């Protein structure tokens, strides 16, 4: 029997399988490989905070309040400067000086000559209690005010305080506290001779008499022959020891039985360590003092009362006698010393002398 031309039949499932395998092969060779994932993820230790918005308070409105003006008081002082005697200036004991301040009227009222500089405290130093101003001083103007003072006789630091006083006797000073303005000085401590009786002899009050009665006032420096008594300075005269004197104080008693002469000296403030020293004896105008015999006496007048400190009997022995008295027991007291010579019987020829009478401070 003869062979025929027939087409073989392929099942659909097989075709699909072959096609799929071909596509997978193509995909495996043509597509790139995916990047591998990291093994560990990195985490920040602290999260970054998010910014927070804080609203600002409103700006306050500043209100400028003008200052309240304080009215000037009627009377007030402004110290400008010292014109003389700066603080702690050294002034010699007993010296007079003028202190001047420059002041400004810092009040509202005009100062008039009815206003005055007044001492309000400290050491007066001889100051006047009140010194009127010499001119009118309007508010804001300046004036120089002065006071005359005397330095104390004792060494140390001294201060005197002042203010002004108005016409109604109201006292006022510097600034709101009414502080005083002042003068302050230093007085040096003096050593050696602090009181010279020869230098002060002309300032002494000389009297004579008999017994215990003052009878006559003596003119210092009178005639040598004055029978009421003699008190004078002499120099270059012969003394009982044969020497010629330097300057001496001659004190001849009143020429009567038990006559005397005495000189009371200016006041003196005694300090610790003060000593009275002198040499006593007789002048010998004819070369000899003969039978002269007297008592030399140092007295002290304190508060008007006469006190005898020491007495020395002296005859014409041909020698001067050195005397000394410790005055420390009178420390702090103001004393008027008195030098006296008393005749022992007849006063004729009693030419008594004091050589270098003085107060010394070691």
Image (spheres, rainbow, N blue to C red):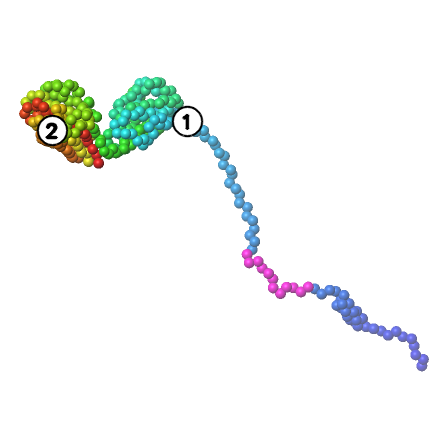
Task: Judge whether residue 303 is colored magenta.
Answer: no
Question: Is 302 positioned to the left or the right of 57 in the image?
Answer: left
User: Residue 260 placed where, x, y %?
Assistant: 10, 24
Give the CA separation, mark 2 to mark 1.
78 Å
**Prevailing secondary structure class for the magenta stretch in the rendered image:** loop
Single out the residue that lies furthest toward the right. Answer: 2
Question: Secondary structure beneath disc 1?
Answer: loop
Residue 296 tag number = 2
Residue drawn at (10%, 31%) of the image = 317
User: Residue 191 placed where, x, y %?
Assistant: 24, 34
Residue 20 visible here:
no
Q: Mark 2 or mark 1, which is nearer to you?
A: 2
Residue drawn at (35%, 27%) of the image = 82
Instruction: Indicate whether 230 appears above or below 20.
Output: above
Residue drawn at (36%, 22%) of the image = 143
Q: Which residues are magenta?
A: 35-46
Question: Is 13 positioned to the left or the right of 191 in the image?
Answer: right
Q: Which residue is mark 1?
A: 69
Say which of 27 and 65 sits in front: 65
Say which of 161 and 107 sits in front: 161
Q: Earlier in the sequence, mark 2 or mark 1?
A: 1
Question: Is 267 positioned to the left or the right of 214 in the image?
Answer: right
User: Residue 324 placed where, x, y %?
Assistant: 15, 34
């Amino acid at each position: 029997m003869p062979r025929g031309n027939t087409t073989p039949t392929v099942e659909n499932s097989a075709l699909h399988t072959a096609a799929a395998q071909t596509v997978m092969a193509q995909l495996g060779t043509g597509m790139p490989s995916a990047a591998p994932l990291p093994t560990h993820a990195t985490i920040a230790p602290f999260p970054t905070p998010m910014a927070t918005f804080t609203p600002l308070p409103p700006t306050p409105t500043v209100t400028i309040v003008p200052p309240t003006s304080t009215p000037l008081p009627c009377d007030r002082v402004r110290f400008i400067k010292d014109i003389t005697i700066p603080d702690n200036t050294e002034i010699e004991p007993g010296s007079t000086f003028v202190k001047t301040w420059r002041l400004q009227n810092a009040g509202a009222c005009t100062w008039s000559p009815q206003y005055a500089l007044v001492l309000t405290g400290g050491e007066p130093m001889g100051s006047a209690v009140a010194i009127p101003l010499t001119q009118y001083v309007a508010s804001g103007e300046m004036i120089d005010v002065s006071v005359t003072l005397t330095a104390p006789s004792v060494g140390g630091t001294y201060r005197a305080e002042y203010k002004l006083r108005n016409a109604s006797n109201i006292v006022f000073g510097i600034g709101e506290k009414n502080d005083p303005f002042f003068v302050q000085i230093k007085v040096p401590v003096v050593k050696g001779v602090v009181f010279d009786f020869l230098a002060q002899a002309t300032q002494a009050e000389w009297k004579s008499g008999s017994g215990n009665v003052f009878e006559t006032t003596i003119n210092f420096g009178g005639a040598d022959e004055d029978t009421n008594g003699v008190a004078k300075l002499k120099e270059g005269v012969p003394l009982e020891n044969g020497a010629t004197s330097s300057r001496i104080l001659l004190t001849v008693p009143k020429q009567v039985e038990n006559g005397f002469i005495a000189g009371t000296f200016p006041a003196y403030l005694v300090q610790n360590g003060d000593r009275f020293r002198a040499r006593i004896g007789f002048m010998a105008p004819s070369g000899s003092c003969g039978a002269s015999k007297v008592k030399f006496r140092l007295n002290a007048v304190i508060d008007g009362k006469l006190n005898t400190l020491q007495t020395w009997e002296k005859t014409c022995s041909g020698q001067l006698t050195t005397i000394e008295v410790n005055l420390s027991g009178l420390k702090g007291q103001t004393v008027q010393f008195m030098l006296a010579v008393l005749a022992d019987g007849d006063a004729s020829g009693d030419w008594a002398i004091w050589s270098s009478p003085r107060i010394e401070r070691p």
